[in-house]
Amino acid sequence: MGFIKLLFLSNLIKFLKFFFVISCDLKPIKSALFANEIALATDKEILRLVNLPGPKLTKILQISVILIFFIFKNFKRSFIKLSKFSLLFICLLVYDCLSVMIIKTIFSLAASIIKFIIFYLFFLNAYADAVNKKYEPNEKGILALMYHRFEENKYPSTNIKINIFRKHLKIIKENNFSFLNPKNFELEFNKVSGNKKILLTIDDAFSSFYLNAWPILKKNKIPFILFVSTEAVGKKGYMNWDQIIEISKEDFVFIGNHSHSHDYLVDFKFEEFEKDINKSIKIFEKNLGYNSNFFSYPFGEYSLEQKKYITKKFQYAFGQHSGVIDLNKDKYELPRFPINEKYGDLERFKFLINLLPIQYKVITPEEKFLLDVNNPPELVIEFFNDQPKINKINCFSNEGGEWKNSKLNYKKDKIEVILTEKFLPRRGRINCSMQDEDGWRWFGTQFTLN
């Protein structure tokens, strides 16, 4: 009976592993499969110590059992009535009771337990990223800034004057905010930020960045992420691969992926989108030897299907909606404040770098690509149970093509944003703010229209 219990426990472990696999959603599947690979290796290493019988022994046992039943059928006629399933079951039972198989089962059980523990640990780690944490009142957040061109004054919507850029850096230092090195991003993202940190990001790798901003950042060793669209590299007005490789050698510089074409990817068929992303990854691997952990959506636009694909290729993805990053934000919808000539004046800059995050559990709908049938969206912001003063939050949006205050329906731990007019092409934006004893808090979200 003890051995039967051993067999039962061994198979129970296998069932539990299977149950965890089918219970996982898409986000931790990759980690789960990786855990299973490690577990298989562990299993093989343990079973290597045992000389196991092969398939031939199994067949011999099957034939032997059937012969025994045939020889003794006159003494025990009830054996004749045994079904094929019953014969197979008894055969396997005899096979499992061999001494060598008992040893195998003991080692297999030990391996299964180890596999289960490994799998469970990876399972918890995977879901730690997928499940929102509790509200953290002391969270100061990470504020990401997005620049494009430097001293290209004929492009005011994406340009910043270099003297203004120098003043931006000075203001950050005067406020005693530290610049976040992207190599520490994962560590900082997953913990409560007791002190505000600033993350510099530069999109598109224009030549004006290399000529005008890079010398300043290099001299002061100020960390940043440079997001590169691979199709444009080497063309007029853009950095070439030699320049990108040069700056990537510094330990405070990270090169991020910004797609291949930098087109309106949300308009692509999924197969075209997938091809564009994979092409950029191959070019990264060819020229840099790796693909980046960071991705930036061109124009901050994406559909839910595209976002899910990005989660398979990158660890983090940034949009172009405003807000402050905290440990509860979706790591594939990270906010950044766009900085240009219009939105880079010093008074606004001083205001925004002091903003704090508004934490929330989830925003619905998750789909940020709107068709006519779901425009305007039914927007709901869900907060944490112990989160204070959510009734002090105000939101405004550009519904109908004009910025206006949005009507809000405050519920327990939720806010419904009542949008009465459609967003007009190409983007719909909603920004929410609140002032408390610690200062102004802010978050935003962006929708893209077909």
Image (spheres, rainbow, N blue to C red):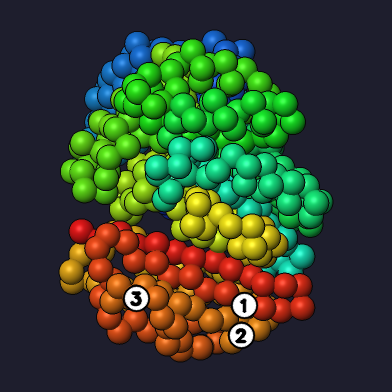
In the rendered image, residue 128, in percent from the top left (x then y), is placed at 60, 51
Give the number of the disc on residue 392. Answer: 2
Three-letter amino acid code at disc 3?
A: Glu
For the C terminus, the quadrant is: bottom left
Residue under numbered circle 1: 434
Q: Locate residue 88: give its quadrant.
A: top left
User: Please, what secondary structure does the residue beneath circle 2 have?
Assistant: helix
Q: Is residue 33 visible?
A: no
Q: Give the side of residue 282 with respect to residue 409, left or right.
A: left
Of pointers 1 and 2, the one earlier in the residue sequence: 2
Residue shown at the point (51%, 17%) measured from the top left: 243
Label 1: how many residues lie within 10 Å, few (<14), some (14-19) or many (20+)?
many
* Cβ–Cβ under 8 Å for marks 3 and 2: no
Give the CA distance from mark 1 to mark 2. Answer: 6 Å
In the rendered image, residue 351, in percent from the top left (x then y), is placed at 66, 64
Q: Is residue 320 above or below residue 365?
A: above
Nearest to the observer: residue 200 or residue 330: 200
User: Please, what secondary structure does the residue beneath circle 3 have?
Assistant: loop
Nearest to the observer: residue 63 or residue 151: 151
In the rendered image, residue 51, in percent from the top left (x then y), is placed at 54, 10
Q: Is residue 249 visible?
A: yes
Three-letter amino acid code at disc 1?
A: Met
Q: Locate residue 215: give its quadrant.
A: top right
Of pointers 1 and 3, the one earlier in the residue sequence: 3
* Cβ–Cβ under 8 Å for marks 1 and 2: yes
Of pointers 3 and 2, the one earlier in the residue sequence: 2
Label 3: how many residues lie within 10 Å, few (<14), some (14-19) or many (20+)?
few
Give the number of the disc on residue 402. Answer: 3
For the N terminus, the quadrant is: top right
Residue shown at the point (55%, 21%) measured from the top left: 41
